[in-house]
């Protein structure tokens, strides 16, 4: 009888199924609704939902209600959890493959630097999520990417907590930046158009050159209820989420050739 110590690690057992692996690879690119995953995989909805539940139970995927249409649910792949699971899997195979033997990353200089690519971040007000993403990607690429953000209904000014969280947590100053309407970018070419707002995703116009469209379903931190401190904590959580997604975007951008 095979002992439990010889069983494959949980990540391997989860990811080895062909449909679950397909779901993981699709969600690695961005957030999707069930019906979109059904279309992408060509599998019945009940089967897709079943395997999504297994991935959720395994802690690799989580779901959140759409901030635009509460009847919709977006699924998101936790890439940090996947990285931990892969490290644990390597260690289970051989000690030399443990995390301790892998060169650490995290600082801008240690990450792949993409060639000159164009990335547009969009949300509704262009006052919080999209300017945070714009600033973080520009910082991470040290100006090597052409990054801009815009909104469908831009606010008059950036949200004060968006400016504050970038300054205090990342040392980035966007005090002089102003929200812009995405109509001002009509005719511009981008390699990626990334929506961070469920509402903006549905309304985002087409841009020339058929850029890759990606969605990050991130709640508006400005909508957080409570005290001023609670509001700022919401911005810190949002910035941390965006920072994680930006770090994982960098190796993808590095595959684009001018």
Image: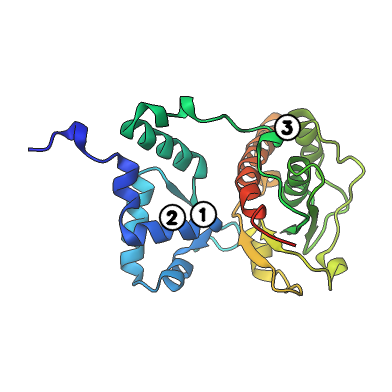
Query: Which numbered disc, 3 or 2, marks the residue that appears first in the sequence?
Result: 2
Q: CA distance from mark 1 to mark 3?
A: 34 Å
Measuring from the top left, give residue 137's x and y in whole percent.
Answer: 73, 46
| Between marks 3 and 2 in the image, the one whose residue lies nearer the viewer | 2
**Residue 227 horizontal side relative to residue 150, left or right:** left
From this viewpoint, which residue is outermost toward the left?
1
Q: Nearer the viewer, residue 213 or 141?
A: 141
Quadrant in the picture for residue 108 = top right
Quadrant in the picture for residue 255 = bottom right
The residue at the point 20 percent across, 35 percent down is 6
**Residue 85 horizontal side relative to residue 103, left or right:** left
Does residue 193 appear in the picture of this structure?
yes
| Label 3, residues with CA under 10 Å away: few <14, some 14-19, many ≥20 | few
The residue at the point 68 percent across, 32 percent down is 107
Measuring from the top left, give residue 83's x and y in whole percent.
Answer: 47, 39
Specify the label residue 24 is tagged with: 2
Measuring from the top left, give residue 200's x and y in whole percent.
Answer: 69, 63
Q: Nearer the viewer, residue 142 or 120?
A: 142
Query: Which numbered disc, 1 or 3, marks the residue that appears first in the sequence?
Result: 1
| Dot 1: element | helix
Residue receiving disc 1: 28
From this viewpoint, which residue is outermost toward the top?
100
| Dot 3: element | helix
| Label 2, residues with CA under 10 Å away: few <14, some 14-19, many ≥20 | many
| Dot 2: element | helix
**Residue 160 horizontal side relative to residue 64, left or right:** right
From this viewpoint, which residue is outermost toward the right?
176
Measuring from the top left, give residue 129's x and y in whole percent.
Answer: 71, 48
Residue receiving disc 3: 228
| Label 1, residues with CA under 10 Å away: few <14, some 14-19, many ≥20 | some
Q: CA distance from mark 2 to mark 1?
A: 6 Å
The vertical placement of 148 against 225, above or below, is below
């Amino acid at each position: 009888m095979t002992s439990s110590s010889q069983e494959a690690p949980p990540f391997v057992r989860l990811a080895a199924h062909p449909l679950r692996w397909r779901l993981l690879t699709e969600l690695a690119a961005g957030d999707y609704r069930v019906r979109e995953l059904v279309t992408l995989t060509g599998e019945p909805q009940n089967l897709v939902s079943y395997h999504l539940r297994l991935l959720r139970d395994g802690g690799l995927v989580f779901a959140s209600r759409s901030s635009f249409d509460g009847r919709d649910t977006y699924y998101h792949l936790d890439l940090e959890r996947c990285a931990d699971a892969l490290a644990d899997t390597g260690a289970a195979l051989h000690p030399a493959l443990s995390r301790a033997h892998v060169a650490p990353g995290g600082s801008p200089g240690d990450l792949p630097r993409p060639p000159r690519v164009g990335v547009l971040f969009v949300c509704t007000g262009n006052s919080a999520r999209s300017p945070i993403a714009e600033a973080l990607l520009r910082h991470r690429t040290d100006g090597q990417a052409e990054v801009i953000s815009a909104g469908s209904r831009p606010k008059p000014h950036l949200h004060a907590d968006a400016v504050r969280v970038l300054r205090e947590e990342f040392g980035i100053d966007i005090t002089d930046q102003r929200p812009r309407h995405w109509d001002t970018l009509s005719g511009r070419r981008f390699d990626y158009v990334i929506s961070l707002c469920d509402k903006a995703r549905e309304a985002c116009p087409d841009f020339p050159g058929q850029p890759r469209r990606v969605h990050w379903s991130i709640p508006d931190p400005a909508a957080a209820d409570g005290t001023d401190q609670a509001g700022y904590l919401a911005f810190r959580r949002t910035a941390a989420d965006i920072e994680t997604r930006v770090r994982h975007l960098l190796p993808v951008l590095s595959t684009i050739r001018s």
